[in-house]
Amino acid sequence: MDLVKPAKPKKTKHYIVAVCLMVVIVVYLLWQQWASHSSVRRAEILVAEVKQGPLTLSVDSFGELRSAEQFLLNAQSAAIVKVIHHKAGAIIRKGDVIAELVSPDLVLQVQQAKQALRQSRTIKEQLLLTQQRELLNEQTQLMQKQGALKTLALRHRAEQNLAQQGIISALNFAQTETTLHTLQHEITMLEQQAKQLQALHDSALILANEEIDIREQELNNLLEKQQQLEVRASTSGIIERMPLALGQRVNVGDELALIGSNQSLVALLSVPQSQVRWVETGQDVMVKMQANTVKGKVLRVDPVVTNNSVEVEVSLPNILPKQARVQLSISASIVIKHLANATYVQRPANAKDNQTQTLFALSNDDTAEPVAITFGASTGKYIVIDSGVEAGRRLIISDLAYLASLDETILLK
């Protein structure tokens, strides 16, 4: 019986299988290499070129125009708002009536002050009459004593001759002489008493006049308050604020209106607390008012921080654009420093001054490599590059922090 041998597979078939396996392995390895690189879409990123040249460092801010001179009108007495003639934003001249107030209590106080003044004047008149009567009494007594002294002096001279001749006794003459000395002393005392009485009268009159002056001053103050119930503009300008409403009751010291001079304006800027450390008095400021830009100077930096910002006052030139007015919203750029030759780029996302950040620099083969860049000061939309990349390179300024942490080249699709 014959045996049938199986046919041997051809060697070419093994070669084909081996080649296919090798191709699969190569493709797999290439795919693994490609997949090991992260990728981003070009349409989803922002790219900026690193530039070199002169750069002005500035701090951008916003704010509004205010009057360089402001005048606050306060209520001088408790009253009720009766009429409002002008409201906030109105342009007024000095002396214009802004509002009218009424105060029944003040009317009563004026009447009481007038009555008190009349009473003080009446008391003074009564005092004058009393003083005149007292002076007349003193003068009458003094004249009587002086008349008696003259009579007694004549008697003294006559008795002196008679006593020397022995016609009258020495005792009688001595009594006359004693009476004469006593009368002279009484006259001296009356004269001193008259002087003291006159001084007392003068003091009483001074007090009475002072009382009248006080009453007159009180009345004048009340009359002035009564006149101030007509709230008048103390200067020409614009009403910046006027919080009154009809029927509103105001108390002493309450604000009635805030008037700002429209002759001179200043800019009040709100600067972030993190950037105000570079702002100093005297620095130039470019203030933008709608379509116009004017140049000013930093006048004052407020030491108080409010809501993470600091108020900076900027002086403005006397001649301003027509649209310049109080409370106009403005934007401004405070010039901090001029750099003659700086390397800078448009500010990347999350970039901070004087810190190092990893960005991706574009290459010519549709890839981007991570580069550690040290930033300096920033200004507006630009930030200075201290080291890490040269001018001409293109950087991805979008936020790719999640890829930068991998520290590997990325592909651009």
Image: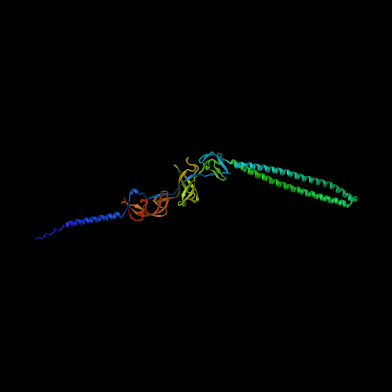
The residue depicted at 66 percent of the width and 42 percent of the height is: 115
Horizontally, residue 101 falls left or right of residue 141, namely left
Query: Residue 105 location, x and y as percent?
Result: 60, 42
Horizontally, residue 56 falls left or right of residue 191, namely left
The residue depicted at 63 percent of the width and 44 percent of the height is: 218
Q: Work out which residue is located at the far left of the displayed protein and give it.
A: 1
The residue depicted at 72 percent of the width and 48 percent of the height is: 200
Q: Is residue 223 visible?
A: no
Residue nearest the viewer, comparing 175 with 162: 175
Q: How many marks?
A: 0
Which of the 4 quarters of the picture holds residue 221? top right
| Residue 7 versus residue 55 in the image, above or below | below
Query: Residue 194 location, x and y as percent?
Result: 76, 47
Residue nearest the viewer, comparing 264 with 67: 67
Which of the 4 quarters of the picture holds residue 103? top right
Q: Is residue 269 visible?
A: yes
Horizontally, residue 190 falls left or right of residue 365, namely right
Query: Residue 340 location, x and y as percent?
Result: 42, 50
| Colouring used for the render | rainbow
Query: Residue 378 location, x and y as percent?
Result: 42, 51
Image quarter where the N terminus lies is bottom left
Residue nearest the viewer, comparing 35 with 249: 249
Residue nearest the viewer, comparing 284 with 398: 398
